[in-house]
Image (cartoon, rainbow, N blue to C red):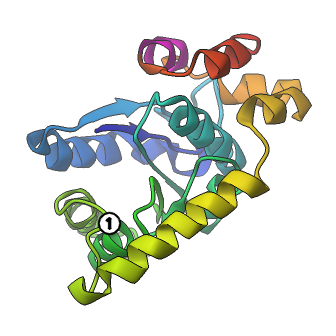
Amino acid sequence: MRIALINENSQAAKNSLIEATLKKVVEPMGHTVDNYGMYAADDEAQLTYVQCGLLASILLTSGAADYVVTGCGTGEGAMLACNSFPGVICGHLVDPSDGFMFAQINDGNCVALPFAKDFGWGAELKLEMIFQQLFGFGHGNGYPKERVVPEQRNKKILDGVKAVTYRTLPEILEDLDPDFVRATLAGAKFKDLFFASCKDEIIAEAVKKFC
């Protein structure tokens, strides 16, 4: 699995800590982490949590990433923004049990975490445990186990609803403020990471217009 890490501007100073913790947990599982930044609070390319949502959608719908880890101060704004775009099912995680249950019950492809609220002493240990529960036991296996059939059925229903209620990403990119889109894609490593992993040529061409 290719996991993308995205940080918005208010919590960008924690990017290296989050990346190190995520890699510590998931790389031994065979997963790859691509860090799309922000890398520091004073990065030239600044991302709001709304732009994190757009970037998550671009990465997931194009196949450049299989999963996105993002967040903001409380995690709420990033979760709302991610779920505003097509191809994203984002959960809000605050503790390890959230990670396990979101993976097993909801089987989403994106999580938003609070990187300021209750992020104090031992925060990296809590993150480590969340990532272990999120990525360490597979996805969509049901919780409790006897609920697996209706939970998987509900996930398919949600996927079908989202496919109908959202326009395609290239259409959305055309109608968004172009400066907003360009700023979203202005990260120092975006082009190298994205175009090396993108699996959808139509989305790649739509993105190239803004890079």
The part of the image, by quadrant, that contains residue 179 is top right
Against 53, residue 211 (above or below) is above
Judging by the rendered image, the residue that carries numbered circle 1 is: 140
Instruction: Left or right? Give the position of 54 relative to 18.
Output: right
Q: Nearer the viewer, residue 148 or 116?
A: 148
The segment highlighted magenta reads: 190-196
Q: Is residue 29 magenta?
A: no
Give the SS element for disc 1: loop
Residue plotted at (48% across, 33% down): 37
Which quadrant, please, contains the N terminus? top left
Quadrant (top left/top right/bottom left/bottom right) for the C terminus: top right
Q: Point out residue 166 in the picture as x, y percentages from the top left corner.
A: 76, 51
Number of marks drawn: 1
Give the residue displayed 59% in from the left and 50% down from the top: 10
From the viewer's perspective, is 157 left or right of 22?
right
The x, y position of residue 5, in whole percent, is: 42, 40
Residue 127, x across and y down, in percent = 28, 62
**Amino acid type, label 1:** Gly
Q: Is residue 173 left or right of residue 82?
A: right
- Please tell me whether the stretch drawn in magenta is mainly helix, strand or loop: helix
Q: Can residue 73 be seen?
A: no
